Amino acid sequence: MIDSNGFEEHRQTSNPPHVDLGHTLRVFLRRITSHDQDEFLEGVRASTGLNLPATPAAVQTFFARFDEGQSADGLLICLRDTGAIAGNVNINSIIRGRFQNGSLGYAAFAPYGGRGYMSEGLGLVLRHAFNTLKLHRLEAQISPDNQASIKLVKRHGFRYEGYSPDLLFINGAWHGHDRWALTNDMHGTVPKTPHPTLPDH
């Protein structure tokens, strides 16, 4: 069954290999597990310009920081027909209380870039972040010359909030980034009940 936003409604199958966090006709969303190491490394090594770990030890350290949305959530966008990993989306630096905020990081793996898989997958991530994790706000810090990423977040309704010099340490140096953000009310996905850490007033 397809909803009004073009997402296929979740259908639980018996003993699924992974927990399906949502899917469209072409992709599904699931969490990273330690068993994804080899395919993840293949994707990183086949791609160019990704700021992702490229050795087994670094990948396991990277995976270990994800705790199912408590402080960070590591997610994979996979093809429904083959299960292949098309891309990675992380919700990092989750802060609760009055902020209810997370920071997005994402990358498409070769040869799946440019086919719309990341856009479909990001739509699923947004629903997961706002409905399941009950975040109020997501941020994306993007290099000004990364036009593909800027187009991706603009397509999903993120607003530009300014430029911050020396924001992120990448490849041995500090780099300035544009800041983009989306709130659950901007997205039209406000949960019926807020996260329990949100103060009453």
Image (tube, rainbow, N blue to C red):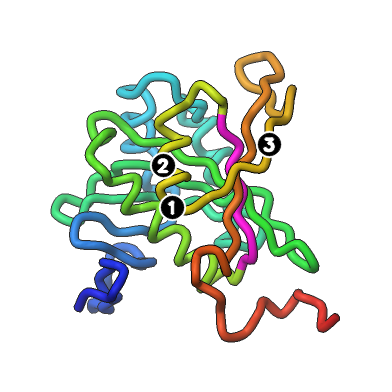
Numbered circle sitting on residue 50: none
- Would you name the residue on which mark 3 appears? 162
The extreme top residue here reads 172
Numbered circle sitting on residue 156: 1
Q: CA distance from mark 1 to mark 3?
A: 18 Å
Residue 201's quadrant in the figure?
A: bottom right
**Is disc 1 in contact with disc 2, using a CB cutoff of under 8 Å?**
yes
Q: CA distance from mark 2 to mark 3?
A: 17 Å
When the figure is inspected, residue 22 is found, relative to residue 55, above or below; the finding is below
What is the span of residues highlighted in magenta in the rendered image? Answer: 135-142
Residue 133: give x, y in percent of width and height: 57, 69
Name the mark nearer the viewer: 2 or 3. Answer: 3
- Residue at image coords 52%, 47%: 90
Q: Is residue 182 left or right of residue 79?
A: right
Residue 138's quadrant in the figure?
A: bottom right
- Residue at image coords 82%, 83%: 200
Q: Is residue 105 magenta?
A: no
Residue 105: give x, y in percent of width and height: 53, 41
* N-terminal-most mark, 1 or 3: 1
- Would you name the residue on which mark 2 appears? 152
**Is disc 1 in contact with disc 3, using a CB cutoff of under 8 Å?**
no
Q: Amino acid at mark 3?
A: Gly
When the figure is inspected, residue 72 is found, relative to residue 187, above or below; the finding is above
Q: Is residue 121 left or right of residue 133?
A: left
Q: Is residue 172 left or right of residue 149?
A: right
